[in-house]
Amino acid sequence: MSDAERGSLSERITTRLLKLDAYRKASCVMAYMSFGGEFEPAGFIGILLAQKKKLVLPRVVRGSRSLQLYGVNNLERQLEAGVWGIRQPNASLCQEVRASQIDFVLVPGVAFTVRCERLGYGGGYYDGFIRGLEAPRPALVAAAFALQVVPELSISDTDERIDQVVTENVDYCRNQS
C-alpha cells in the first residue's frame, strides 16, 4: 500500500474510531506510535489531545517483555527512539500511569479476524498487558485496514482477543460471530 493510500485509509479509520461510544466516554486513552505499514495513529492522537483527553503511550521493556505506561502531552518533546525504532515516551520527561486509569486502548496488530482474534508482532507485549488488566477493563479496540482482517488465524492460548476491530468500512465486535 502506498503512503498516500495508507494515510487516506488511516483518516477514514480515525473518523470511525472517534464515533465509538467507548472512545467518546473515555477521558484517558492509550494509543501507540506506528510501526511499518500499519494504521497511522497521528491524526487520532492529535484529535484526542485537542479534546483534552489524557494520552498514554507504552514504553517497551525488553527484559521483562512488558509495557510501561506514560502520560504524554507533547509528542515532539517527550518521545525518543525506542526498540525497533518505534518512538516511545522518554521516562525522565513523562509521568508513569497505572493501567487502571485507562478507559480506552488502541491495540496494534498484524492481522485480525471478525471474531476479534489478534495476531501481534510476536513479542507478547500486548498479550501480557491485556492479561494483566483488572476488571472492569478498558475497551480494547484495534484500528486495522480491511486487508488485515482474515478468515482464520493460528492463535495460541497466550493470544488475547480484543473487543472490537475498526476498519475503513466495517467495525467487528467480539460478540459477533
Image: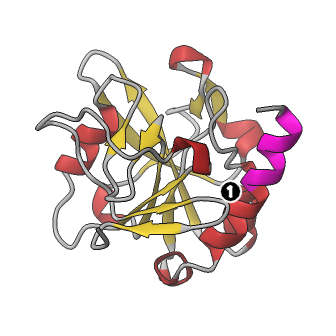
Q: Which residues are magenta?
A: 3-10
Q: Residue 64: percent from the left, percent from the top? A: 23, 22
The residue drawn where x is 33% and y is 40% is: 126
Q: Is residue 69 left or right of residue 35?
A: left
Question: Residue 8: within the magenta?
Answer: yes
Q: Which image quadrant is residue 168 in? A: bottom right
User: Of 173 and 76, which appears nearest the observer?
Assistant: 173
Residue 38 left/right relative to 105: right
Q: Which residue is mark 1?
A: 45
Colour setting: secondary structure
Judge by depth and name the residue closer to the eye, 108 or 54. Answer: 108
65 versus 25 height, above or below: above
The answer to whether 141 is drawn above or below residue 22 in the figure is above
Q: If the image is split into quadrants, where does the N terminus sit? A: top right
Query: Where is residue 177 drawn, in percent x and y?
Result: 29, 68
- Residue 22 lies in the magenta stretch: no
Mark 1, other Cα within 10 Å: few <14 / some 14–19 / many ≥20: many
In the depicted structure, whether residue 111 falls above or below residue 9? above
Rendered residue at 21%/56% (across/down) = 133
Asked where in the image residue 101 lies, by quadrant, the reply is: bottom left
Q: Residue at position x 44%, y 66% from top?
A: 172
Measured as percent of width and height from the top left, residue 10 is found at 73, 52
